Image (cartoon, helix red, strand yellow):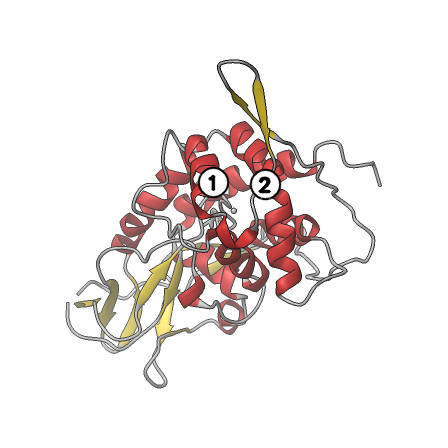
Amino acid sequence: MRRTRLTGGRVSSRTLKGVLLVAVLAIGAGVAYLGFGPAPEQVRPAEPVPQVQQPAEPASSGLIEPVIRYPIVPELAVVEAPAEAAVLPPPELAGSDDRVAAEFGSSFGGGLGELVVVKDLVRRIVVTVDNLPGERLPLSRSPVRKADGGFIVNEQDGARSIAADNEARYLPYVLFAEQADMRMLVAAYRRLYPLFQAAYDELGYPSAYFNDRLVVVIDHMLAAPEVAGPIRLIQPKVRYRFEDPELEALSAGQKIMVRMGVDNARRIKARLRELRQGLTAGAPAR
């Protein structure tokens, strides 16, 4: 058996985090984007074809409705001054990085650390969230940095599968998502919501509502299948692909959930459910 660690070329791993992430705000997650690339050398025995189990959550339609389903009432930040409290409105999108990093950083225990790309963070989150249900993610616009190390493939007698060791590469992102105070995160998102809507308008959706899109995408990520057993790969050209055509047909976002491993995916989904509850609280019953 040969075990291959891929460290160069187009192999990368990105995750959204607690949306902050579905960009893990996909967090996020949020959330881990893994691009398959060419193969060098290393090994383990070939294992049975995985069984795909669809979870109970319904798959997202990906459609954007003209009527706002989950309205966000923006909150104002209050800063205590010696004399009186000062109310801070959201900054302009172009100059928002420091304020956004400070607001979200407090939700994650005081800072965003080395995992998050602060420059143009709101735009990065919005474009990543919007593309998760699609075929590809714009990796240059990811709100989080790529995972350390190389993607590891098990190989025996020409059969390849994702090595279980890859799950450890996603743990920093999972732990980051789990340390978030979801109540504070949602409150910060509400205070900064005009920035997210402005970034969504820039993408060409002036009459659509970003929070509705975010909820749709969270539902889409929650509907990602759980795969029991090793995940077989093929390499028709340079990039690896899933051998199972049903897995290969998944969206970029759902492939992230599959590639990070069942345990990691379940932990991220638990955070996304909490996030969804906070984002839809107070919405009228349908």
Could you say where residue 241 lies in the image, as x and y percent from the top left? 40, 74
Height in image: 260 above or below 182?
below
In the picture, residue 59 is in which quadrant? bottom right
Height in image: 194 above or below 205?
above
Dot 1 alpha-carbon crowd within 10 angstroms: few under 14, some 14 to 19, many 20 or more: few
Residue receiving disc 1: 99
* Element on which disc 2 rests: loop
Toward the front, the furthest residue is 83
Q: Which mark is residue 241?
A: none
Type of amino acid at the residue the image marks with label 2 = Pro
Task: State the count of labels.
Answer: 2
Residue receiving disc 2: 90
Instruction: Name the one closer to the observer, 37 or 71.
Output: 71
| Quadrant of image for the N terminus | bottom left
Instruction: Name the one closer to the observer, 111 or 240.
Output: 111
| Quadrant of image for the C terminus | top right
* Left or right for 8, reference 218: left
Could you say where residue 7 lies in the image, as x and y percent from the top left? 21, 67
* Left or right for 95, reference 281: left
Q: Earlier in the sequence, mark 1 or mark 2?
A: 2
What residue is shown at x 67% (from left), y 48% (from top)?
Answer: 211
Dot 2 alpha-carbon crowd within 10 angstroms: few under 14, some 14 to 19, many 20 or more: some
